[in-house]
């Protein structure tokens, strides 16, 4: 593989060259076949990992090291990730969000952070851009039993919270999406929801290093359909927790009521951790359809992040749909 300085290549070049490299080793097709045939149980095979390590370390950036996530799952394409979306403020039709949100203005933008904090602060786009970003390749498992693997760009929410200094009384973090019935057609079409879109995390969940404020994917700024300019990504929870286009974050004492809890409390709990053993009242959560694959694969406890996050739920009865 030709050596080029990382400053000379665009993120897509990195992904493409990485994929070519894996293909030359027969990795891309081989791992896809294994995954399709056996599901996640087989994905701990280390062959892909060792192949990735075979490339001379100084020839690649961290981004180029990874076009699979840590279970060896291939990334979904930019095309898939930006054209199959849930964003009810625009439409409930996943394949029309991209079109309806095209050109939606996300600049200027402000995120007001307050509540039980010592340093309330309103973050402008420039303030958000000042956070050092990193790439995080995460699986995303929608509660509707489909999933993707997405290379996010972003910064840990904990870094933002450190700037506002939560008070010790704060127990939860409440997030709010922009409320724009004039600019987003879904508000009027779906008036029965309690807009704006609200989500929440416990402070411990919010401080966890996996919890990301995403500002981009595939190395580019987010498009409106994915929640530009900034959205939450909590990879061990069902996708609806990963609230888009955030304008307000508050530290609070009471557990926030999310839009989905308000809409159907028996179907959508506050914690909403991915759990293949607890079915949705209307469908099984045991398996999922990975967008771009044929057939289904088994779903994984905490979406595969159990080692990192299970301790957050010590003593909680995980057989209940919270
Ligand atoms: N504001 C807002 N955030 C949202 C949603 C939404 O409808 N509105 N949908 C959620 C759901 S159900 C999922 S699965 C993910 C989808 O994110 P993606 O379209 O970027 O893949 O966004 C979540 N965040
Ligand atoms: Mo979802």
Image (cartoon, rainbow, N blue to C red):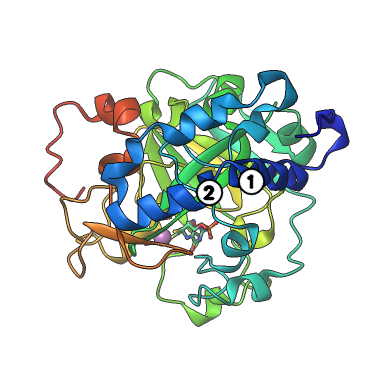
In the image, taking residue 67 as reference, residue 130 lies left or right, namely right
Residue 282 position in % (x across, y down): 20, 70
Q: Which residue is drawn at 15% across and 33% down?
A: 316
Quadrant housing residue 294: bottom left
Identify the secondary structure beneath mark 1. helix
Residue 139 place in picture, x, y as percent: 44, 46
Q: What element carries label 2?
A: helix
Give the residue displayed 69% in from the left and 57% down from the top.
223
Against 189, residue 155 (above or below) is: above
Q: Mark 2 points at which residue?
A: 28
Is tag 2's residue or tag 1's residue first in the polypeptide sequence? 1
Q: Does the residue labelled 2 lie within 8 Å of ligand 1?
A: no
Q: In this view, does 1 lie to the left or right of 119?
A: right
* CA separation in Å, label 2 and label 1: 7 Å
Displayed quadrant of residue 112: top right
Q: Which of 221 and 232 is in front in this view?
A: 221
Judging depth in this view, the residue of 18 and 123 nearest the camera is 18
Q: Can residue 94 be seen in this view?
A: yes
Residue at figure coordinates x 57%, y 63% from the top left: 80
Q: Residue 146, located in which quarter of the rendered image?
A: bottom left
Quarter of the rendering occupied by the N terminus: top right
The 10 Å Cα crowd at callout 1, few under 14, some 14 to 19, many 20 or more, is: some
- Which residue is farthest front? 25
Mark 2 in CB contact with mark 1 (< 8 angstroms): yes
What mark, if any, has residue 125 been given in the picture? Answer: none
User: Total marks drawn?
Assistant: 2
Q: Mark 1 points at which residue?
A: 19
Q: Which of 129 and 163 is in front in this view?
A: 129
């Amino acid at each position: 593989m030709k050596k080029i300085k990382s400053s000379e290549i665009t993120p897509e070049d990195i992904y493409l060259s990485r994929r070519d490299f894996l293909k030359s080793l027969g990795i891309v097709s081989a791992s896809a076949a294994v995954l399709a045939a056996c599901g996640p149980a087989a994905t701990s095979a280390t062959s892909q990992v060792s192949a990735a390590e075979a490339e001379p370390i100084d020839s690649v950036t961290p981004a180029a090291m990874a076009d699979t996530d840590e279970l060896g799952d291939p990334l979904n394409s930019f095309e898939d990730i930006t054209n199959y979306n849930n964003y009810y403020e625009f439409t409930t039709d996943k394949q029309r969000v991209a079109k309806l949100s095209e050109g939606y203005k996300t600049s200027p933008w402000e995120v007001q952070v307050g509540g039980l904090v010592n340093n309330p602060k309103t973050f402008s786009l420039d303030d958000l851009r000042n956070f050092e970003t990193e790439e995080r390749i995460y699986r995303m498992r929608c509660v509707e039993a489909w999933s993707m693997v997405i290379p996010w760009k972003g910064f840990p929410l904990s870094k933002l919270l450190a700037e506002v200094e939560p008070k010790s009384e704060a127990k939860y973090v409440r997030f709010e999406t922009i409320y724009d019935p004039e600019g987003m057609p879904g508000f009027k079409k779906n008036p029965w929801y309690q807009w704006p879109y609200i989500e929440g995390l416990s402070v411990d969940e919010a401080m966890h290093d996996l919890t990301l404020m995403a500002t981009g994917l595939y190395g580019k700024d987010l498009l409106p359909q994915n929640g530009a300019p900034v959205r939450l990504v909590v990879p061990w929870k069902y996708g609806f927790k990963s609230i888009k286009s955030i304008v307000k974050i508050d530290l609070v004492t009471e557990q926030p009521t999310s839009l989905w809890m308000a809409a159907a409390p028996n179907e959508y709990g506050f914690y909403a951790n991915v759990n293949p053993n607890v079915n949705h009242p209307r469908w099984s959560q045991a398996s999922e359809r990975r967008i771009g694959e044929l057939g289904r694969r088994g779903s994984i406890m905490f979406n595969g992040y159990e080692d990192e996050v299970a301790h957050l739920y010590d003593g909680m009865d995980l057989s209940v749909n919270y």
